[in-house]
Image: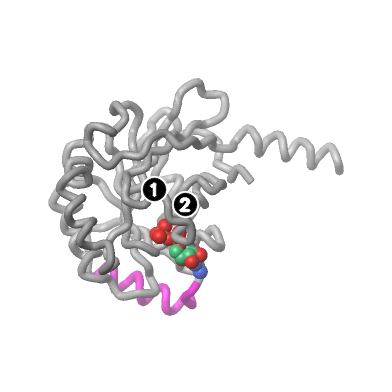
C-alpha cells in the first residue's frame, strides 16, 4: 500500500507543470522577446482570471483580486514540463477591465500596450476570453469579443464559476452565449471544482505540437 502511494506520488511529480513569473509589462518595450507559443488570458476584473490560471498550474502563480498587485500590467509566466530544459509555453495574464473606477485608466492603457500586444505579438497562439456565466455578458465583454473576432486571433470563450449554477442554469447560460457568439469555442470552467480543467489544458496543448502526446497534467499541490 505504502509502495503504491509512493509510486503514485512519483508519477504525479513527473507530470507536474512547472511555472515561473517572468516579467510584468506596462509598455511594449517590456515584453519578453517572442519565443515559445503564448496563451493570453483576458476578462473583466473579478471574472475569476487569477483563479483559472492558478487552477491550471496548481499553484498561486497569478494573484487574486483580494491581493492587488501587478494588476495593470501584462504578466508573463513561463510554463515548463518537468525534464525539459526550456519553457514550453508562456501564459500572459492581461489586466482585468470593466470596473468603473479603473476603466478610464485601462482605456488609456489599451492602446498603449494591450492592443499592440493582441494585434502584433508574433508568438501569441491562443486567447482565452473569460466570461462569468453567472452574469449576463456586459458591454465590455462584447467589446473584447468583437475585438478578438476582428483581430483574427484564435480564441476560446471560457465561462467561469460554473459551479455556482445548476446543470440546467449552466446549459441555458451556455446556450445564450453560443447564440450571441456563434463562432466562439465555448468551455464551462470552475476553478473551485476543477470542472473544465482537463479540457482547457487539452485546448492549450494543441498549440504546442511537441506536447500533444505528453502525459496528463497534475497540479503542483
Ligand atoms: P480576477 O480578478 O479575474 O483575477 O478574479 P479572481 O480569480 O481573483 O476571483 C474573483 C472572485 O471570484 C474571488 O472571490 C474568487 O474566490 C471567486 N471565484 C473565482 N473562481 C471561482 C470559481 O470557479 N467558483 C466560484 N464559486 N468562485 C470563484
Callout in the foreground (2, 1): 1
Which label was assigned to residue 63? 2
Q: Is mark 1 within 8 Å of ligand 1?
A: no
**Disc sitting over residue 177 in the figure:** none
Residue found 52% across the figure and 44% down from its top: 57
Whole-percent x, y for residue 109 in the image: 20, 50
73 to 179, vertically: above or below: above
Dot 2: within a 10 Å radius of its alpha carbon, few (fewer than 14), some, or many (20 or more) residues? some
The location of residue 126, given as percent across then percent down, is 30, 43
The magenta region covers 164-179
Q: What residue is shown at x 49% (from left), y 53% (from top)?
A: 197
**Compared to 100, does 31 lie above or below?**
above
Secondary structure of the magenta portion, mostly? helix
Q: Earlier in the sequence, mark 2 or mark 1?
A: 2
In the image, residue 119 lies in the stretch drawn in magenta: no
* Tag 1 secondary structure: loop
Q: Is residue 168 left or right of residue 34?
A: right
Instruction: Sort mark 1 into few (<14), some (14-19) or many (20+) by Cα contacts within 10 Å.
Output: some
Within the image, what quadrant is residue 138 found in?
A: bottom left
- Residue on which the image places disc 1: 70
Nearest to the observer: residue 206 or residue 105: 105
Query: Residue visible at 32% across and 52% down?
Result: 95
Percent from the top left, x then y, of residue 198? 50, 50
Marks 2 & 1, CB-CB < 8 Å contact: yes
Amino acid at each position: 500500500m505504502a509502495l503504491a502511494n509512493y509510486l503514485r506520488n512519483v508519477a504525479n511529480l513527473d507530470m507536474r507543470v512547472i511555472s515561473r513569473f517572468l516579467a510584468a509589462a506596462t509598455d511594449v518595450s517590456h515584453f519578453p522577446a517572442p519565443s515559445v507559443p503564448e496563451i493570453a488570458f483576458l476578462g473583466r476584473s473579478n471574472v475569476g482570471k487569477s483563479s483559472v490560471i492558478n487552477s491550471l498550474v496548481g499553484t498561486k502563480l497569478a494573484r487574486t483580486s483580494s491581493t492587488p498587485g501587478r494588476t495593470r500590467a501584462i504578466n508573463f509566466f513561463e510554463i515548463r514540463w518537468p525534464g525539459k530544459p526550456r519553457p514550453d509555453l508562456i501564459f500572459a495574464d492581461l489586466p482585468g477591465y470593466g470596473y468603473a473606477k479603473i476603466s478610464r485608466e485601462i482605456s488609456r492603457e489599451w492602446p498603449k500596450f494591450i492592443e499592440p500586444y493582441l494585434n502584433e505579438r508574433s508568438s501569441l497562439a491562443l486567447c482565452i476570453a473569460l466570461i462569468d456565466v453567472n452574469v449576463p455578458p456586459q458591454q465590455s465583454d462584447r467589446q473584447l469579443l468583437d475585438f478578438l473576432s476582428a483581430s483574427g486571433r484564435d480564441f476560446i470563450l471560457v465561462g467561469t464559476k460554473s459551479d455556482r449554477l445548476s446543470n440546467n442554469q449552466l446549459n441555458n447560460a451556455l446556450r445564450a452565449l453560443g447564440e450571441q457568439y456563434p463562432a466562439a469555442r465555448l468551455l464551462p470552467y470552475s476553478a473551485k471544482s476543477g470542472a473544465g480543467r482537463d479540457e482547457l489544458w487539452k485546448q492549450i496543448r494543441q498549440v504546442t505540437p511537441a506536447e500533444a502526446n505528453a502525459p496528463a497534467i497534475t497540479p503542483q499541490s
